Image: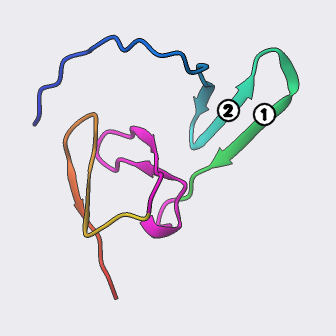
Amino acid sequence: MSRRATEAVETDAEPINWRQRGSDVTLYDETNPDAWVRMTFEAGVPPEHRLYMICDDCGAVFAQRTTPGASTVCGDCGATFEHRHD
């Protein structure tokens, strides 16, 4: 298991508001009640078709900005996942 330290990062970017309920993640703008998007995660979806990486070991959810390569490493618990390429 990896050991990671918490580090404060200063940025000028606007924070992203989000909340997770079960398999749903909602991104929203707290100043505009009509500005939100909700995503539901389904088990078994191939990694190359996911918008987010979901760790099977700890349940952490991360934005997946590119198609995964041969493996993925969880940023929270350090678990490594090998991906099939048929």
Is 82 placed left or right of 12 in the picture? left
**At 44% across and 40% down in the image, what residue appears?**
61
By secondary structure, the bulk of the magenta-drawn segment is best described as: loop
Classify mark 1: residues with Cα within 10 Å, few (<14), some (14-19) or many (20+).
Answer: few
Q: Which residue is mark 2?
A: 27
**Residue that lies at the very extreme toward the right in this rendered image:** 34
Q: Is residue 55 above or below residue 72?
A: above
Is 71 placed left or right of 55 in the picture? left
Disc number for residue 62: none
The answer to whether marks 2 and 1 mark residues whose Cβ atoms lie closer than 8 Å is yes
**Residue that lies at the very extreme toward the bottom in this rendered image:** 86
**At 11% across and 34% down in the image, what residue appears?**
2
Is 54 placed left or right of 7 in the picture? right
Is residue 39 within the magenta segment?
Answer: no
Of callouts 2 and 1, the N-terminal one:
2
Is 27 placed left or right of 22 in the picture? right
Quarter placement of the N terminus: top left
Quarter placement of the C terminus: bottom left
Where is residue 65 drawn, in percent x and y?
48, 52
Secondary element at tag 2: strand
Q: The residue under label 1 is which amino acid type?
A: Trp
**At 75% across and 40% down in the image, what residue appears?**
37
Where is residue 60 drawn, in percent x and y?
39, 38
Q: The residue under label 2 is which amino acid type?
A: Leu
Disc number for residue 36: 1
Q: Provide the residue span drawn in magenta.
A: 43-66
Secondary element at tag 1: strand
Report how many numbered discs are placed on residues in the image.
2
Q: Quadrant of residue 18?
A: top right
